[in-house]
Amino acid sequence: MTYSGLGTGAVNTFSIGDGMKFTVVGASQDFSVLGATSIDAASLYAKSGGVLDLSGATTYTAATGYNADRELSATNAGSLLNLSGLATLYRSQTDAADVRINATDGGTVTLTGISAFSDNPNGNGSGQIQVSATGIGSLVDIPGITDINNVAFTVRDGGEISGQLQTATNSSVTVRSTGVLDLSQLTDFSGSSLYTEDGASVAMVAGNINASSLIARKGYQGSGGAQITTSATSYTAAIGYNADRELSADGAGTLLDLSSLTTLTRSETNAADVRINATDGGTVTLTGISTFTDNPNGNGTGRILISSTGTGSDVNLSGMTTMKGGGCYPQQWRCGSAWESEFVSGWKNHNGQQCIGPGCTCRR
């Protein structure tokens, strides 16, 4: 259903069924509901300056079933999807049914009444909530959200998601270019992934970054210069099958600064590696690490895989004094000038020869 060309309109009650779509399109197009509002499992859109005011709705429950994604969206300057009355937003009870909340090209989605994304009481609550704001002036207004789990936040090119996250577990956060997301109060980022792209810079104050992936990279624009810094002092790998994690920097001027880490503990399971990668001129700094630590809760068999590929790429482990169970081999570890002064004695290349020159690949 589409509301367009009718100016300002209001109804006393409003109900839309599972899987249906309702769109308000055009400047000066304003549709509002004065009373009871039911919008469960519907997709709702405001476009080209249109206003869809459904502030009378108090709950939203995601759809159930395969490929049952739903969207709550505002696109273009002046467009507003007002869901400020929602107190509860239930995720789907099935994996393949996400809720996508999007503000694009200057649009605004208002969810000021939400304090948490809730698991579905009828299932395992495994459907993901995906929140994105793309473009200058775009805003997803959710100031009450401080804790997320199984949620994806994305801000790009001037878009903003309001509020101050305190915990983000088993989630994904992407900041591209001038995207705005306040992570200054974040304390727990365990099991989550952070991506900075195209010059974006994020200072991680979270003390718990265990089992996370931290990736600074070239993004859609192909620009380097993205940065991630952290004040965490320890990192412990994930546990479980196919639970690899990545700490990486990709692109000229791109930096993942983990110099505050003094302990990096490998996984207690075989199929959970930590991949530390610098590519195409990126830098990963781990100068506080003197050795990789076995997990005290298991046999510590998860691997640490380190690679540096491309001119100017650098994994800086200048504080490393002991390596246990393995070594550095061609295309896995490049020993640059930071290694030479400290490890020229006792470190050898893959042919067993002394490591004596810049760029040599070596092992203990």
Image (spheres, grey):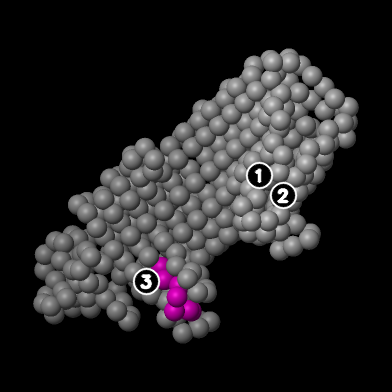
Secondary element at tag 2: loop
Quadrant of res 5 = top right
Mark-to-mark CA distance, 1 and 3: 39 Å
Image: magenta residue range: 268-274
Is there any visible trace of residue 54 in the rendered image? Answer: yes
Relative to 76, 246 lies left or right: left
Q: Which residue is mark 3?
A: 304
First reached walking from the N terminus: tag 1 or tag 3: 1
Q: Which residue is mark 1?
A: 70
Mark-to-mark CA distance, 2 and 3: 40 Å
- The local crowd at label 1, few if under 14, some if 14 to 19, many if 20 or more residues have their Cα within 10 Å, is many
Disc number at residue 270? none
Total labels: the figure holds 3
Q: Nearer the viewer, residue 335 or 50?
A: 50
Q: Is residue 78 above or below residue 64?
A: above
Q: Which residue is mark 2?
A: 62
Evaluate if marks 1 and 2 touch, with contact meaning CB atoms under 8 Å apart.
yes
Relative to 264, 355 lies left or right: left
